[in-house]
Amino acid sequence: MIVTNLSQGGYIDELLERAGMADYTSTHSIVAVYHGRGSDELNDRSLKDFGHEQLPFKQFTANAAWYYMMVLGYNLLECYKYDVAYDVVPTGAYATTIRRRLIDIAGKIVRHAHKRRY
């Protein structure tokens, strides 16, 4: 059950209509927005998967620099995923999937005739 104040003829409906989003007051749109509510959290999950859940330093400025570099690297990986590797990995793949498909394959150790080749 979804409880909302939309589509009850209130002030919020007028504001949505003025903004050109009157279709958000329909039942179908309310349910669609409700079903998509968890997709915002997937970006945070993807960033945590790329880097660390805990920052490594005790000082705020060092952690801030580390975080900014992590976000920059994450954005570069996302650009690479959409621009270069779109036919190898799905665009919704997490960083670990990209590492497994693109990087780990190149560094796999192969055993042959009791010798290790790198």
Image (cartoon, rainbow, N blue to C red):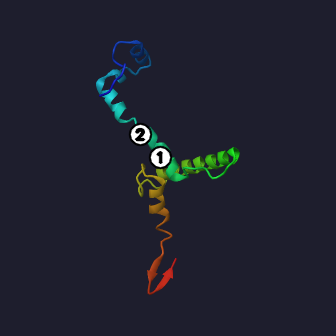
Q: Which mark is residue 45?
A: 1
Number of marks present in the image shown: 2
Q: Secondary structure at mark 1?
A: helix
The percent position of residue 116, horizontal first and vertical second, equals 50, 81
**Which amino acid lies under the numbered mark 2 shown in the image of this protein?**
Ser
**Which amino acid lies under the numbered mark 1 shown in the image of this protein?**
Arg
Q: Secondary structure at mark 2?
A: helix
Identify the mark nearer the N-term, 1 or 2: 2
Q: Which mark is residue 39?
A: 2
The percent position of residue 71, horizontal first and vertical second, equals 58, 47
Work out whether residue 21 or residue 61 is closer to the camera in this orientation and state it.
61
Q: Residues within 10 Å of mark 2 (few under 14, many from 20)?
A: few
Identified at 52% across, 47% down, the residue is 47
Identified at 44% across, 19% down, the residue is 19
Work out whether residue 104 or residue 84 is closer to the camera in this orientation and state it.
104
Work out whether residue 61 or residue 87 is closer to the camera in this orientation and state it.
61
- Label pair 1/2, CB-CB below 8 angstroms: no
Work out whether residue 114 or residue 58 is closer to the camera in this orientation and state it.
58
Instruction: Point out the residue furthest to the front here.
Output: 58
> Would you identify the image quadrant in which residue 61 lies?
top right
Identified at 39% across, 16% down, the residue is 13
The percent position of residue 25, horizontal first and vertical second, equals 34, 21
In the rendered image of this protein, does residue 30 appear above or below residue 61?
A: above
In the rendered image of this protein, does residue 33 appear above or below residue 91?
A: above
The percent position of residue 72, horizontal first and vertical second, equals 59, 48
Mark-to-mark CA distance, 1 and 2: 10 Å
Q: Which mark is residue 105?
A: none
Q: Residues within 10 Å of mark 1 (few under 14, many from 20)?
A: few
Quadrant where the N terminus is found in the figure: top left
Whether residue 23 sits left or right of residue 114 in the image: it is left
Identified at 63% across, 46% down, the residue is 68
